[in-house]
Image (cartoon, helix red, strand yellow):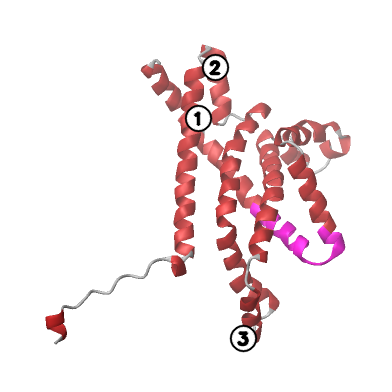
Amino acid sequence: MDLPFLYETFLSLVAAVPLTLQLAASAIVLGAFLALGLALCRLSGILPLDWFARAYIFVFRGTPLLVQIFLIYYGLGQFREVRQSIFWVVLRDPYWCAVIALMLNTAAYSAEIIRGGLLSVPFGQIEAARACGMSRFMTFRRIALPLAIRQALPGYSNEMISMVKATSLASIITIMEVTGVAAKLISETYRAIEVFVVAGAIYLAINFILTRLVALAEYQLSPHLRQPAALPSTSTGAAR
């Protein structure tokens, strides 16, 4: 291992970390809203919405993310109607194509995680909220959704980690995030081991920080699971 080369490689790859984080954050945030809508469709009891959500989840969970990226970036541009539409401003940009593909993919997985979280909310708490006069929307916003988020957070954290790693696929459509810069360095230096070791260490550090943030969020959302502070014991003499 050439330490000076590793250091130079690290500096080159770290410069691409903001783009990697931007890709992951955009996909996770946008995908969370879409996943919530899909989960509500699954739980709505309305058959057309339920079957639409089922079909969406089946397609995007059953096909590789790499194929989805190719279809959005290369496939849509083959249709003249798409190239002449107002959406072409977005779809011709590889960054937004990657964000759309990542968003659509993570929404399919996250929808099932959120649905499981919503189903885990005790029905007694919903009945108590209704007995207090809360509307269905207020009950969902104040009772069901916060409890569902707490229940779904461990599983959803795994999906967030997967999205951070999935951003590496964006390099195939000319986006120079961490993996894209790593591939460029390898083509210039032919030193794949050193470059990929540094790239892997960067992804490992990002995901470590992410897991610590999720653990902190779980701690803040679970005050009822914490051990109560021990009361100071008084001596027998002081008690007398």
Give the quarter of the image for residue 227: bottom left
Q: Secondary structure at mark 3?
A: loop
Q: Residue furthest left?
A: 237
Q: How many numbered discs, if any?
A: 3
Tag nearer the camera, 3 or 2: 3
Mark 1 residue type: Gly
Front position in the image: 167 or 44: 44
Determine the main secondary structure of the stretch shown in magenta: helix
Q: Is residue 124 above or below residue 52?
A: below
- The residue singled out by tag 1 in the image is 200
Q: Is residue 36 above or below residue 99?
A: below
Front position in the image: 235 or 20: 235
Identify the residue at image location x=75%, y=33%: 67
Q: Earlier in the sequence, mark 3 or mark 1?
A: 3
Task: Classify mark 1: residues with Cα within 10 Å, few (<14), some (14-19) or many (20+).
Answer: some
- The residue singled out by tag 3 in the image is 132
Identify the residue at image location x=76%, y=36%: 72
Find the magenta span and give its range: 32-50
Q: Is residue 203 above or below residue 4?
A: below
Give the quarter of the image for residue 236: bottom left
Mark 2 residue type: Ile
Q: How far across and down, in percent of the image, does residue 42 sit?
A: 77, 60
Mark 3 vs mark 1, CA separation in Å: 52 Å
Mark 3 vs mark 2, CA separation in Å: 64 Å
Mark 3 residue type: Cys
- The residue singled out by tag 2 in the image is 186
State if disc 2 and disc 3 touch (CB < 8 Å).
no
